[in-house]
Image: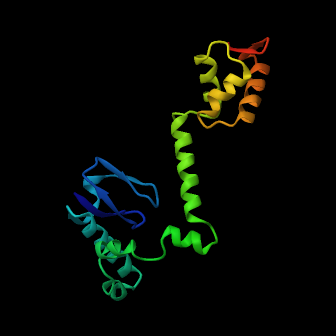
Amino acid sequence: MYAVVGCSDCGALKIVEGRPDTTQCLRCGKRRKFEKLKKFVQTDDEDHAREVRASMLANRRGEGEAFAELDSFAEMESRVEDAGVSDDEFLEASGIDAEEVAAAAERAENRSASTRGGSRKETVRDALRELDRPTEDEVVGYASERGVPGEYVREALEKLARRGEVSESRGRYRLL
């Protein structure tokens, strides 16, 4: 159920879904029991609630007639997809190769999926946990397979060693 309710302090209108115990005004912050709020309409159709609220706001501003000439939210929403230019058309008009953008997005998605959502630093730590006393090159290889650049891995190993989180002995690393 959706209800169009009004705030008794500031007059703001909002749509409340369901029947919560209390609701807070988005404009003035006043919290009231839902049952005590003035309900202008209660409906099972969210679009109908949106229409009523929008109509009330338009009437408050003296724009009721102009609002009445507009199509319903559902009709306008169905036409939104056809309005404007597509992402590819926009990129091409801006001088950007849309296919190259798509390829870069796919590479980035594959890279982030392969790091299992972990950070670059976590990938370096994972290498140190999973590999048995690895060399710098072995850590770089492990991390590069997961999309982490070698330069970053070398700097991370150096910083981790300086902080005492990693020990390095004869070219082999160990997580402490």
118, above or below 95, in the image: above
Which is nearer the eye, 82 or 173? 173
Which is nearer the eye, 1 or 127? 127
Residue at 31% over, 81% down: 71
User: The N terminus lies in which quarter of the figure?
Assistant: bottom left
Count up the numbered dots. 0
Residue at 36% over, 87% down: 66
User: Where's residue 124, x and y in %?
Assistant: 65, 26
User: Where's residue 18, x and y in %?
Assistant: 25, 52
User: Where's residue 48, x and y in %?
Assistant: 25, 69
Residue at 28% over, 48% down: 20
- How has the structure been colored for display? rainbow
The answer to whether residue 120 is left or right of residue 70 is: right
Indicate the quadrant where residue 92 lies. Answer: bottom right
118, above or below 33, in the image: above
User: The C terminus lies in which quarter of the figure?
Assistant: top right
The answer to whether residue 126 is left or right of residue 171 is: left
User: Where's residue 134, x and y in %?
Assistant: 68, 17
Indicate the quadrant where residue 129 lies. Answer: top right
Which is nearer the eye, 129 or 37? 129
The answer to whether residue 166 is left or right of residue 123 is: right
